[in-house]
Image (spheres, rainbow, N blue to C red):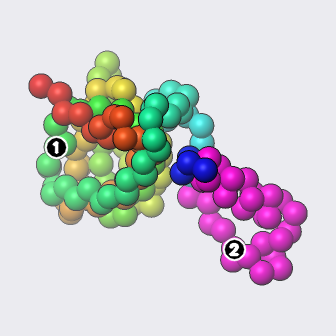
Amino acid sequence: MNIRRGLIYTACFIAGAVSFGVAQSGYPPLEVLLSASQTTIGQDITYPPGKAKITAAIVTMQPGEKTGRHRHEAPLFAMILEGEVSLDYGNGVTRYFKKGDTFLEAFQTSHEGTNTGDQPVRILVVFAGSDSVKNTIMEP
């Protein structure tokens, strides 16, 4: 069974357990951080071809620091652990996120992040990628 299918089965089991009250009789309580099928700019989630590969990381940016223009080739879950960040997608589309916010980042779309706060921003990112694509591609 590939990782993606295993994650789907696990999610379905947990959802079923919660729906039928099994979680109340032994399964720990769940705090759903995010359940979505579209990115922050309204794109439907699709997975890249190839063998599934999950990558989790923490991005740390200092006040005023920018990521540089880049794009992601795989779906990406993000949670702001500390600080705040703005994401500029071009054409006047900017989104702002602060500590505790979660979102599915745009993919295959050029954007740039900026730490807009006065303290470091730390972002937990989890890519649902594959062995056939890079998670992040920097642009000129």
Res 105 seen here: no
| Residue at position x 43%, y 51% in the image | 54
Residue furthest out toward the bottom: 26
| Residue occupied by mark 2 | 29
Q: Nearer the viewer, residue 99 or 79?
A: 79
Q: Residues within 10 Å of mark 1 (few under 14, many from 20)?
A: some
| Residue at position x 74%, y 59% in the image | 13
| Residue at position x 61%, y 50% in the image | 1
**Principal SS element in the magenta part?**
helix
Residue 63, position as x, y percentages in the image: 16, 55
Residue 113: image quadrant is top left
Query: Looking at the image, is 43 positioned above or below residue 112?
Result: above
Q: Is residue 11 left or right of residue 57?
A: right
Residue 98, position as x, y percentages in the image: 38, 55
Residue 127 tag number: none
Query: Looking at the image, is 79 positioned above or below residue 114?
Result: below
Residue 87, position as x, y percentages in the image: 31, 38
Cα distance between the residues tagged 1 and 2:
37 Å
SS of the residue under disc 2: loop
Q: For the image shown, how many numbered marks are present on the structure?
A: 2
| Residue occupied by mark 1 | 66
SS of the residue under disc 1: loop
Pointers 1 and 2 in contact (CB under 8 A)?
A: no
**Which quadrant: the C terminus?**
top left
Within the magenta stretch, is there residue 25? yes
Q: Is residue 36 left or right of residue 111?
A: right
Magenta segment: 5-33
Res 54 seen here: yes
Residue type at mark 2? Pro
Q: Nearer the viewer, residue 10 or 86?
A: 10
Q: Is residue 52 left or right of residue 97?
A: right
